[in-house]
Amino acid sequence: LLFSTGLAAETYTVGTSAGFPPFEYVEDGEIVGFDIDLMEAIGEEQGFEVEFVDISFDSLIPGLNAGQFDIVAAGMTITEERAEVVDFTDPYFSANQAVLVREDSEDDLTVLYGDNKLAVQTGTTGDLWVEENLQDPEIFTGDVTHFDTFVMAVQDLVNENVDGVVLDTPVAQRYAEENPVEMVAEIITGEEYGLAVADGNTELLEKLNEGLEQVRESGRMDELLDKHF
Ligand code: GLN
């Protein structure tokens, strides 16, 4: 045939880190979650398809800048430091940090004091918060273990290798529903999540911002929030 039946839609590759339920996680071997549905909804509005790549959270920004994928959708907090090297869309979700401990432990906020073992996911705002706020040896003399994924950090908490995990509130809540762990403190950091594109990729950034707006206005955003939270 000398003609094709239609124009193939553009496909964008989206980097994510699927240990961040309910935003992105693996279920029956598939990456699912709020960010996944959100990207698909934006793609439908803006006429593109999406394909996901699952890697460790701290490899997302380097991968985006190296051209391994076009977009990052990973519950990523918009921070000044990150905004120097990538471009963020308008915010789409607000969160704080939280502390998880084992259900049977006597720790609460006290886990942030003295000689305790904490776990974080490398390169996250929780990692940064611990680094910036638990420096004073008069307050915290314990260890901080860095994991590639929150799945491993929470597993180590359940296995009693660490005493607390610092992570984003909505994700801490979800882990607490599904594991013998509980959320004992909220640290008000006032974070906002954005999608990211490589620095200067204005064309794609505009599509994402327009798509976000359309997803909000059509009521689809509320449907996705209801579905996942
Ligand atoms: N919101 C946090 C951050 O941006 C954690 C994101 C994540 O672990 N996927 O660092």
Image (cartoon, helix red, strand yellow):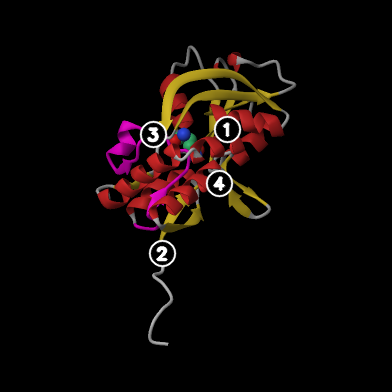
**Label located before the other in sequence (4 or 2):** 2
The residue wearing badge 1 is 171
Q: Are marks 3 and 1 in contact (CB under 8 Å)?
A: no
Q: Secondary structure at mark 3?
A: loop
**Range shown magenta:** 67-91
The residue that label 2 is drawn on is 9
Q: Main secondary structure of the magenta part?
A: loop
Furthest residue toward front? 218
| Mark 3 closeness class: few <14, some 14–19, many ≥20 residues within 10 Å | some
Does label 1 point to a residue whose CB lies under 8 Å from ligand 1? yes
Disc with the residue nearer the chain's start (2 vs 1): 2
Residue 27 placement (x, y as % from top left): 66, 49
Query: What's the amino acid at mark 4?
Result: Ala
Residue, disc 3: 91
**In whole angstroms, how far apart are the C-alphas of marks 3 and 1?**
18 Å
Q: Earlier in the sequence, mark 4 or mark 3?
A: 4
Q: In the drawing, what numbered circle is on residue 18?
A: 4
